[in-house]
Image (cartoon, grey):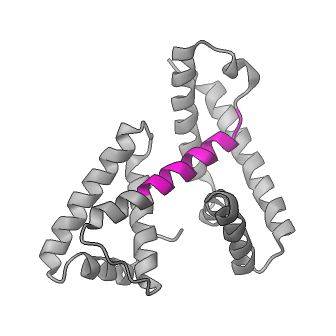
Amino acid sequence: MPDLTQRSFDSLLAWLDPDRDRAGEEYEIIRYKLVKFFERRDCPCPEDLADQVFNRVSAKIEAGTVIRTPDHFRYFYGVAVRVLHEYRQLLQALPLTSDHRLTAAPRTVAVSEHRARCLDECLARLPRSSRCIIEQYYRGDGGDKIRNRKELAQRLGISQQALRAQCLRIRERLERCVRACMEAREPT
């Protein structure tokens, strides 16, 4: 998902409130609540995920989608739940080694948090285009996931099979990076 452009940010603010100052205040309040939402769910990158929520909402507004709601945060919250779900799916798509799966429960939590931090670091190291492709590839559930993958292949101008192969290579690279990160820095 591309970053927020000035034009899309302006559209987002206009949707939040016609008065730009009040819109800016509402933006800050919503962003604070979103960061807290992701922090309470032990996400190691709450600010990035909050930004992803804003990117998605602004993309909808830019695309001309009419969003009618008296409570803007409620709409953002719904998008945040989806982003969290997709983030966790991506995290689960990268398997732990079997020795990590057999550890005691408290250690398993530490390993999962450590793996999430490693995944964030490894995602950040990917070229932007690869990161966007892999995040979009794992977005959604069931029929939504299938539609997203078809649309992604069409946008990239490649077949679904070529997209699958490309994502497999990106995922293998991520798995190697996450394994190396986890081995280099064992969780405490």
Q: Residue 177, percent across and down? A: 68, 40
Q: Quadrant of the N terminus?
A: bottom right
Of residue 138 and residue 71, the one placed in the foreground of this image is 71
Q: Report the number of discs.
A: 0
Most distant residue in the top direction:
104
Q: Is residue 90 left or right of residue 74?
A: right
Most distant residue in the bottom direction:
64
Please name the predominant secondary structure of the magenta segment in the image: helix
184 magenta-colored: no
Q: Residue 72, percent across and down? A: 28, 67
Picture layout, residue 141 above or below residue 150: above
Q: Residue 129, percent across and down? A: 63, 66
Question: Which of the 4 image quadrants contains residue 48?
Answer: bottom left
Determine the residue positioned at 46% across, 76% down.
59
Determine the residue positioned at 18% across, 83% down.
18
Question: Which of the 4 image quadrants contains residue 88?
Answer: top right
Picture layout, residue 109 above or below residue 164: above
Picture layout, residue 147 above or below residue 90: below
Most distant residue in the right direction:
161
Q: Is residue 180 left or right of residue 57?
A: right
Picture layout, residue 139 above or below residue 11: above
Of residue 52 and residue 169, the one placed in the foreground of this image is 52
What span is colored magenta in the figure?
80-95
Q: Residue 168, percent across and down? A: 79, 54
89 magenta-colored: yes
Determine the residue positioned at 86% across, 66% down.
161
